[in-house]
């Protein structure tokens, strides 16, 4: 039984088909699992392990390397405030302080109403609008306390649903059309990869025995 | 003062990212030109252009392509992970001109005779990911990707691969690991030079988004025209991401080595001067991995070798300005905090050193700093990058480790008095508002 | 070995030397006696170069740079400097970084006293810490698996454990999670670290981050005393260091023996100590957790303690009287003994009781004569085979360390794996070809491979294309092919597999065979003559008569055999037909020689207490035929004796004389009369053993590296040599070994025609699990909870057909009985087959597999009904 919804399972399988090796689809699949559950649930992790031919421990270990994956549930809106150098010089610490009060959530925590999770992020590469704020990875470009409050009000009122999807949905544009590579080409890629692995294994073996 | 716009030529249009705008402004003409040439001639043009990699290391793209080991299967990977603090030029290109990037990718793939390319886009760039994916879809529909591109018999598949939030995945071998679905642990070079053992063990070229974005122009105007811009090795233009205490932060395309830091900061078309007319206290060129410059370096030209000659680097093309109101201790602390959070954790000196230095810097800034901390910090830095020279020596697998000391070492050696004041005051002597 | 190795010239600290091309700098430097400090490097895993402790200066194109000695390989003209100020500063810096966040709780840490980090800190550290910050905190030790605790604060992120899990065990049950400073070792959420190899991660952890629950706080390293020995939990024969504190066993660690276990152990072998020590003191003689401490005789229906002389007299009476009648006596066992014990008991049965009725197997093995005749492969040959063909059960469950070795071969070299897929197998993901073989079919598939004219019936799951691919892989004469052969299905007549082996042996004269028999010293017992027609020292004489184990039990039931001698091991639980075995035992008189209690004792008239593993001296022979030494570490409890002594005394009580005064003398006699290298091995207990009946090749042991296997003391102690050395070495011109029987001598035993498949029935496959009903598991409070409840495994095709899903209960009926079990989906089980394990019991303590099994059929068929 698939934990993924039918449509997501299909997208997962299409995604895997984009790569010569299933494991390569790990990050996109984890994004998908998060799109369904809002975080990486145990069942989501198990399904990704099955799809990528890895183990759940391996998937969890891989996912936890990356900041965007949450192993615990998070709020509908994950609000990131960058405090790295350019934003720091633009007053990010003060804005982050304000955000804690305005959202009712400490850094790394979720507000009681489950609406907001607050994160202090590293540089988000939007430094000309410092301090940089993102909501569910959408750059909202609100640099002042007043603009921030206005944004929060809009989010609470559901007035930003058109441009800020709930947490989890990263990319709304689907790939259209599959690969044009032939199955022979893909088989060749796989063979070459296997040979490279074997060559290395034999290098290592040969050298150590 | 602005020179020829190469990669930002289209950016002023609202709909610069659409296929329609792209085609109406000469889009895919470079590719059509390239497809009429022999692949090796495309490589030769790029070599002649002296297109230095725009990702950080500044390695000439043409040379890199020539080093690709011949093999049955090879790959092209585009590095769009841009996470170096205060660097936001690739973000700009991904959102504003994705077709230019794709055209560059097809040109490079054709030159290298690669049939599958990956564009690795930083995961946090949701809009960028959508724009690039849309452009890829449109390019397939337009015949610029897929089978038999523009009836040339050349075929290429492009996969847009989202990252997931880890600075280290900008490092090319960590990026390949992430692309293989693993933890972003950099590989050891040698033997894992991508050109030899890259993606799935096959020879692989990794190039930056901006590097790729220059290719359509080079194909249309020729390598020589590109080389004619700039000075010496530093040819063409470069995007500078200007941030910090300037009136107009932003991404500016500047002809290489023809202008100086002073121009970039003060020219009304670019930075427009320091906020409130304050004096520049320090410049962080090339990303937070680079050693800092002081006001005495304002007249250094914005060229690869020019900056290197003064002990730093153009790196990722970012320029951060600190002025009189900026606390250098705080800035250096925040930079080490970044490294501590982003260290992948493989190598002991980087994993443990970054955390230790960050904690000590935190004390200096927030109270509890001691005079002996300065010597301790420098010694810890020396244990990570022995000799503290530039370019640094390594004790770690990748250069993230040896980048950690740059900020601390720069701040301590340029501003010893500031540290003394912090120690004496029991923390930062500046009120926080003054830091704006 | 004279194979010439290409070399390169390098200099180490100015000293020139020649080293093999491609060698790691850390090893090359080691040749000069310089020890480069290290943590992440482990000689049995691929280098990763992450801890950076081993930085040395290496000359390269950009001048001398700091490089990890464990990662860089030597090249011609390379200059390495290990003693410069720059190197020293870098290494001191790394050590200081490692200690910065380390809790330094050595006084309360299990690893204290044998900790590589502590040792390096003492030899290299500067004493005073410059780290004044708050240390990294994690919740204190957490239980990550049934046997393993993790203290994340002590972890130095060397990745030894995670690499072991991914690279060696191949199960990736633990992995690094988090990034940077926050990296921790972690299993998946909701899934404990229950790998059967988990103990190895504890052993190689260079700090006290991973600890074993059974060992925690049980001893301090400096109290421990060690001998080198061989694990006798299964037939792989892993070399171990056995440690005790006083007369209490505390720990078993794997030794790095190149030909066998290469440092690794399974958790059953490592953690079954309590079954020996009787820590779980129980007095019930019917429990296998009980140690038998004194002789017992049955009086008025109950077993009571007796003196040795009373018990020996009773036993001699029983056996002597039965021996007067032709075919009146026989013996089963021997596989749990040492070679010396088996030899002595074999001599007792043949020369005192004058019986050829003896068998080391329980109807769950393969024909002893055939095994003697097949050309034997070593583990090393199997792991480097060109093509490996398995006709056996799931090796991870049956012979775990053999699984590791073969997995390594298939995963990391070019060995191709062809599986006779009888059911779930841990090697399955690595197989190039899996032939789904149902019960009663293996010999037909083998014939169809060997002979292109033979075709399989239409309903076979093996396609003609698959057969022809396998045929191509095996080649013309089977050069480079190794068959790993065992009993994948205990409910199938062994003739099926034996016939397949005969077919392969004839068709592929250059192929070799590795028996995957599970019981500890079964190979040794067979070599010591424990089977009808087998010759002590090896070999087989056809036509001697004699009954094997199942024939003896039948004869007991029929009243033809009056008495049975059981030596070592419990009959019940080992013979699949439990009811039949009980009837047989009840029908005659039984004398048991054993160290442990067990259900069998219910039927015994005399029980003689014997010493068991870690209490006895001797040699054992593993499945590849390697003879290695076992050493006593503690004294057996109560008045238990060694088998050689008991056999001698019982012979005397019967009026005979074995002329075997001691274990050492027995070893000498074996070697002097048959060339079997028992005494040679005993005299050098610290070697990795010698292959019996094959040219002796010396195995060179790598220099001992305490960093690779922390906790093991220097292992060149000649413990056994001291014990056995008093005897003179055997004249090097040893008596020639009995020659191996010709294949032609063992070619009989064709399979009776395969019965037709009942379309409405499923064929029964009975498999084995690692955690079973045996003494090792049942005697250990840590392993006992790991035994799973019985369940039946089916293919999704059959489940769907029957409308079942995992977890459903179902009634399974054979001609004998019907039982209720839970079903589990596993598509590695062939269609039409239902798999149950002989090792597992249902909630009522019955073994469903045993009940369903039809002893006289070629294979058993069952029907399912949903409840
Ligand atoms: C820690 C670290 C982070 C890096 N991050 C990036 C990055 O975000 N984008 C990028 O293009 N290159 C980055 N690089 C440089 C790449 O490793 C690589 O040199 C580059 O992508 C090559 O492309 P180019 O030759 O076109 O510059 C980074 C390097 C290091 C060591
Ligand atoms: S738990 Fe031990 S073996 Fe595993 S990474 Fe940590 S220190 Fe290394
Ligand atoms: S880096 Fe060589 S031992 Fe760890």
Image (cartoon, rainbow, N blue to C red):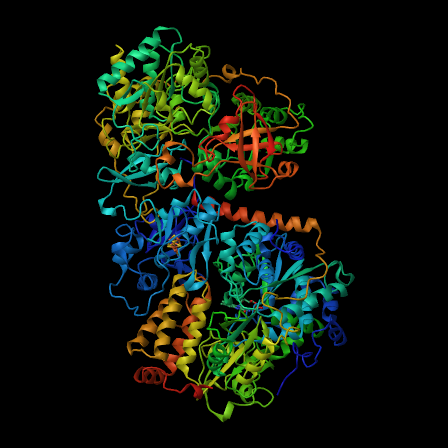
Residue C649, image x, y percentages: 25, 17
In the image, is C353 to the left or to the right of C401?
A: left
Instruction: Work out whether C447 lies above or below C842.
Output: above
Identify the residue at horizontal 34%, vertical 78% (top origin).
Answer: B364
Foreground pick, C268 / C820: C820
Q: How many marks?
A: 0
Instruction: Work out whether C6 lies above or below C553.
Output: below
Residue lying farthest top?
C325
Image quarter of residue C356:
top left
Residue lying farthest bottom?
B277
Residue B335, image x, y percentages: 44, 75
Residue C557, image x, y percentages: 44, 14
Residue lying farthest right?
B151
In the image, is B44 to the left or to the right of B87?
A: right
Image quarter of residue B106:
bottom right
Q: Is residue C265 visible?
A: no
Instruction: Work out whether C106 lies above or below C308.
Output: below
Residue C128, image x, y percentages: 25, 66
Q: Is residue C13 visible?
A: yes
Instruction: Work out whether C55 lies above or below C707.
Output: below
Identify the residue at horizontal 50%, vertical 69% (top origin).
Answer: A110
Quadrant that contains the C terminus of chain C? top right
Foreground pick, C155 / C815: C815
Quadrant that contains the N terminus of chain C? top left
Foreground pick, A1 / C468: A1
In the image, is B402 to the left or to the right of B175?
A: left
The quadrant of the rendered image in which ligand 1 is seen is bottom right
């Amino acid at each position: 039984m698939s934990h993924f919804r039918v449509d997501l399972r299909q997208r997962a399988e299409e995604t895997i088909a984009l790569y010569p090796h299933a494991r390569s689809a790990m990050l996109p699949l984890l994004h998908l699992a998060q799109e369904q559950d809002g975080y990486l649930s145990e069942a989501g992790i198990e399904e990704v392990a099955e799809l990528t031919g890895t183990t759940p421990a391996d998937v969890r270990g891989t996912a936890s390397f990356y900041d965007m994956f949450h192993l615990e549930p998070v709020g509908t809106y994950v609000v990131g405030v960058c405090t790295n150098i350019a934003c720091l010089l633009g007053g990010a610490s003060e804005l982050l302080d304000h955000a804690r009060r305005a959202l009712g959530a400490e850094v790394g925590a979720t507000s009681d109403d489950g609406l907001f999770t607050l994160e202090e992020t590293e540089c988000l590469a939007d430094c000309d609008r410092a301090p940089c704020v993102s909501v569910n990875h959408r750059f909202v470009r609100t640099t002042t306390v007043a603009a921030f409050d206005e944004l929060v009000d809009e989010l609470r009122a559901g007035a930003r649903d058109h441009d800020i999807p709930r947490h989890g949905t990263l990319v709304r544009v689907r790939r259209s059309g599959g690969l044009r590579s032939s199955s022979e080409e893909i088989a060749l890629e796989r063979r070459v990869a296997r040979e490279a692995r074997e060559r290395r294994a034999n290098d290592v073996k040969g050298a150590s025995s | 003062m602005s020179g020829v716009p190469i990669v930002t030529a289209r950016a002023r249009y609202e709909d610069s990212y659409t296929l329609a705008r792209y085609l109406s402004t000469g889009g895919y003409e470079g590719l059509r030109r390239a497809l009429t040439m022999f692949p090796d001639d495309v490589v030769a043009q790029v070599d002649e252009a002296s297109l230095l990699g725009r990702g950080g290391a500044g390695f000439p793209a043409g040379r890199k392509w020539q080093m690709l080991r011949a093999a049955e299967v090879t790959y092209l990977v585009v590095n769009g992970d841009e996470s170096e603090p205060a660097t936001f030029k690739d973000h700009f290109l991904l959102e504003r001109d994705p077709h230019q990037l794709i055209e560059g990718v097809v040109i490079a793939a054709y030159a290298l005779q690669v049939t599958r390319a990956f564009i690795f886009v930083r995961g946090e760039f949701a809009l960028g990911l959508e724009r690039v994916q849309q452009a890829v879809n449109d390019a397939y529909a337009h015949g610029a990707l897929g089978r038999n591109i523009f009836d040339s018999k050349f075929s290429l598949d492009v996969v847009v691969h989202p990252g997931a939030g880890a600075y280290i995945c900008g490092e090319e071998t960590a990026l390949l690991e992430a692309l293989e679905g693993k933890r972003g642990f950099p590989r050891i070079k040698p033997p894992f030079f991508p050109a030899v053992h890259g993606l799935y063990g096959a020879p692989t070229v990794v190039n930056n988004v901006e590097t790729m974005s220059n290719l359509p122009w080079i194909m249309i105007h020729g390598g020589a025209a590109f080389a004619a811009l700039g000075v010496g090795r530093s040819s063409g233009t470069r995007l500078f991401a200007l941030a910090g205490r300037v009136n107009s932060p932003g991404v500016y395309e500047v002809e290489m080595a023809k202008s100086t830091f002073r121009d970039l900061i003060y020219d009304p078309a670019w930075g427009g001067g320091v906020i409130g007319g304050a004096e520049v206290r320090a410049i962080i060129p090339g990303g937070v991995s680079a050693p800092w410059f002081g006001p005495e370096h304002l007249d250094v030209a914005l060229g690869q070798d020019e900056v290197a000659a003064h002990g730093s680097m153009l790196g990722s093309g970012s320029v951060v300005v600190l002025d009189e109101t900026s606390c250098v201790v705080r800035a250096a602390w925040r930079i080490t905090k970044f490294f501590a959070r982003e260290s992948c954790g493989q190598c002991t000196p980087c994993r443990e050193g970054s955390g230790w230095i960050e904690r000590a810097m935190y004390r200096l800034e927030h109270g509890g700093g001691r005079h002996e901390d300065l010597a301790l910090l420098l010694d810890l830095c020396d244990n990570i990058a022995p000799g503290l020279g530039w370019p640094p020596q390594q004790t770690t697998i990748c250069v993230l480790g040896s980048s950690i000391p740059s900020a601390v070492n720069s701040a301590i050696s340029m501003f010893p008095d500031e540290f003394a004041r912090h120690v004496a005051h029991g923390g930062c002597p500046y009120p926080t508002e003054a830091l704006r | 070995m004279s194979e010439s190795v290409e070399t390169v010239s390098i200099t180490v600290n100015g000293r020139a030397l020649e080293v093999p091309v491609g060698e790691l700098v850390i090893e090359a430097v080691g040749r000069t006696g310089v020890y480069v400090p290290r943590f992440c490097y482990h000689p049995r895993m691929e280098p990763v170069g992450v801890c950076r402790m081993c930085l040395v200066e290496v000359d390269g194109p950009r001048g001398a740079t700091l490089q990890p000695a464990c990662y860089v390989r030597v090249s011609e003209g390379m200059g390495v400097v290990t003693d410069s100020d720059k190197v020293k500063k870098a290494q001191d810096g790394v050590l200081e970084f490692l200690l910065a966040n380390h809790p330094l709780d050595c006084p309360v840490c299990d690893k204290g006293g044998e900790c590589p980090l502590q040792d390096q800190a003492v030899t290299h550290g500067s004493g005073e810490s410059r780290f004044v910050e708050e240390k990294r905190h994690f919740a204190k030790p957490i239980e990550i698996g049934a046997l393993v605790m993790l203290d994340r604060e002590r972890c130095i992120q060397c990745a030894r454990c995670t690499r072991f899990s991914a690279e060696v065990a191949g199960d990736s049950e633990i992995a690094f999670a988090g990034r940077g400073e926050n990296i921790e070792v972690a299993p998946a959420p909701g899934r404990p670290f229950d790998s059967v190899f988990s103990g190895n991660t504890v052993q190689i952890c260079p700090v006290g981050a991973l600890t074993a629950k059974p060992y925690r706080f049980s001893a301090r390293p400096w109290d421990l005393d060690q001998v080198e020995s061989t694990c006798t939990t299964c037939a792989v024969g892993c070399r171990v260091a056995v440690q005790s504190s006083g007369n209490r066993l505390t720990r078993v660690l794997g030794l790095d023996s190149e030909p066998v276990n290469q440092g690794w152990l399974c958790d059953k072998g490592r953690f079954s100590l309590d079954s020996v020590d009787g820590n779980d003191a129980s007095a019930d003689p019917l429990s296998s957790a009980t140690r038998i401490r004194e002789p017992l005789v049955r009086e008025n229906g109950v077993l009571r303690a007796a003196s040795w002389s009373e018990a020996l007299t009773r036993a001699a009476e029983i056996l002597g009287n039965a021996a007067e009648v032709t075919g009146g006596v026989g013996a089963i066992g021997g596989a749990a003994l040492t070679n010396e014990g088996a030899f002595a008991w074999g001599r007792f049965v043949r020369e005192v009781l004058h019986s050829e009725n003896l068998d080391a197997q329980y109807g769950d093995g393969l024909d002893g004569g055939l095994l003697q005749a097949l050309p034997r492969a070593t583990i090393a040959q199997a792991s480097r085979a060109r093509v490996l063909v398995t006709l056996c059960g799931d090796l991870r469950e049956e012979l775990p360390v053999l699984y590791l070795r073969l997995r390594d071969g298939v995963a990391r070299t070019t060995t191709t794996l062809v599986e006779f897929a009888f059911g779930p197998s841990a090697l399955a993901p690595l197989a190039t070809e899996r032939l789904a073989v149902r019960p009663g079919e293996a010999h037909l598939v083998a014939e169809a491979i060997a002979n292109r004219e033979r075709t399989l019936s239409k309903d076979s799951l093996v396609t003609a294309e698959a057969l022809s691919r396998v045929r191509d892989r095996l080649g013309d004469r089977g050069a480079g092919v190794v068959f790993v052969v065992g009993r994948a299905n205990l409910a199938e007549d062994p003739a099926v597999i034996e016939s397949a082996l005969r077919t392969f042996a004839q068709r592929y004269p250059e192929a070799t065979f590795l028996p995957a028999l599970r019981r500890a010293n079964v190979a040794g017992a067979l070599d010591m003559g424990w089977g009808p027609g087998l010759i002590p020292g090896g070999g087989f004489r056809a036509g001697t008569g004699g009954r094997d184990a199942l024939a003896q039990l039948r004869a007991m039931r029929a009243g033809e055999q009056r008495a049975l001698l059981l030596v070592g091991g419990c009959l019940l639980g080992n013979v699949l037909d439990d009811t039949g075995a009980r009837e047989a035992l009840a029908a005659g008189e039984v004398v048991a020689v054993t160290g442990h209690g067990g259900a069998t004792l219910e039927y015994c008239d005399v029980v003689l207490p014997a010493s068991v593993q870690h209490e006895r001296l001797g040699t054992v022979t593993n499945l590849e035929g390697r003879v290695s030494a076992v050493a006593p570490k503690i004294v057996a409890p109560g008045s238990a004796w060694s088998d050689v002594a008991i056999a001698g005394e019982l012979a005397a009580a019967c009026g005979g004389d074995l002329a075997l005064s001691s274990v050492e003398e027995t070893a000498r006699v074996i070697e002097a009369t048959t060339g079997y290298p028992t005494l040679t091995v005993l005299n050098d207990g610290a070697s990795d053993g010698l292959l019996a009946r094959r040219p002796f090749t010396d195995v060179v042991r790598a220099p001992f590296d305490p960093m690779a296997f922390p906790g093991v003391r220097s292992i060149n102690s000649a413990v056994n040599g001291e014990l056995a050395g008093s005897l003179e070495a055997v004249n090097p011109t040893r008596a020639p070994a009995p020659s191996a029987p010709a294949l032609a001598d063992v070619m009989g035993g064709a399979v009776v025609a395969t019965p037709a498949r009942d379309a409405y029935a499923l064929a029964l496959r009975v498999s084995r699990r690692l955690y079973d009903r045996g003494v090792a598991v049942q005697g250990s409070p840590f392993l006992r909870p790991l035994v799973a409840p019985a369940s039946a495994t089916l293919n999704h095709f059959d489940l769907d057909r029957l409308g079942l899903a995992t977890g459903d209960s179902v009634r399974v009926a054979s001609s004998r009985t019907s039982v209720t079990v839970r079903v589990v989906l596993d598509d590695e089980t062939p269609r039409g087959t239902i798999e149950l394990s002989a090792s597992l019991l249902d909630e009522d303590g019955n073994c469903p597999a045993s009940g369903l099994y039809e002893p006289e059929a070629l294979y058993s068929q069952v029907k399912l009904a949903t409840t």
